[in-house]
Image (cartoon, rainbow, N blue to C red):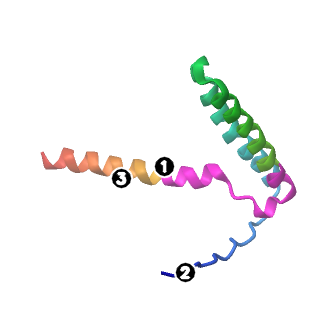
């Protein structure tokens, strides 16, 4: 059975507005830092896996910061992407809660 591969078109360039670079840099570095804080809370027995995960967070932060500053028109805000999805899940949860409240 042959594989069919569809190439996606790259997303369009974002509109660059004053302050976007700074906000993109904060967004780019905040997520790997949050993951690093989460990983640092692991027990000490994490050993090599913990250290590699922290190193990956550092490399990810540097790569994302470079993209946010140097290629700002190509940077997509992570907080916006995951915040919208989280808002949809929360709205669905509250709708379920309201449906249960109204039905009984």
Q: Secondary structure at mark 1?
A: helix
Q: Nearer the viewer, mark 1 or mark 2?
A: 2
Density class for disc 3 (Cα within 10 Å; few <14, some 14-19, many ≥20) is few
**Quadrant containing the C terminus in the rendered view:** top left
User: Residue pushed farthest right?
Assistant: 70
Rendered residue at 78%/54% (across/down): 20
Q: What percent of the width, then of the height, locates residue 59?
A: 78, 42
Residue 92 — which label? Answer: 3
In whole angstroms, how far apart are the C-alphas of marks 1 and 2? 32 Å
Q: Nearer the viewer, residue 6 or 71?
A: 6
Q: Secondary structure at mark 2?
A: loop
Q: Nearer the viewer, residue 82 or 36?
A: 36
User: Which residues make up the magenta segment?
Assistant: 66-85
Q: What percent of the width, then of the height, locates residue 76?
A: 69, 58
Q: Relative to 31, is 18 on the left or the right?
A: right
**Earlier sequence position, callout 1 versus callout 3:** 1
Residue indicated by mark 1:
86
Residue 56 — which label? Answer: none
Q: Relative to 39, is 96 on the left or the right?
A: left
Q: Relative to 35, is 72 on the left or the right?
A: right
Residue indicated by mark 2:
4
Q: Is residue 27 magenta?
A: no
Q: Secondary structure at mark 3?
A: helix
**Earlier sequence position, callout 1 versus callout 2:** 2
């Amino acid at each position: 059975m042959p594989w069919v591969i569809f190439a996606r078109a790259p997303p369009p360039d974002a509109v660059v507005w004053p302050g976007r670079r700074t906000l993109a840099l904060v967004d780019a570095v905040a997520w790997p830092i949050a993951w690093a804080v989460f990983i640092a809370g692991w027990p000490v027995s994490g050993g090599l896996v913990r250290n590699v995960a922290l190193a990956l967070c550092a490399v990810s932060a540097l790569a994302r910061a470079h993209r946010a500053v140097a290629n700002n028109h190509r940077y997509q805000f992570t907080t916006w992407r995951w915040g919208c999805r989280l808002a949809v899940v929360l709205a669905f949860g509250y709708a379920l809660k309201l449906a249960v409240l109204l039905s009984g």
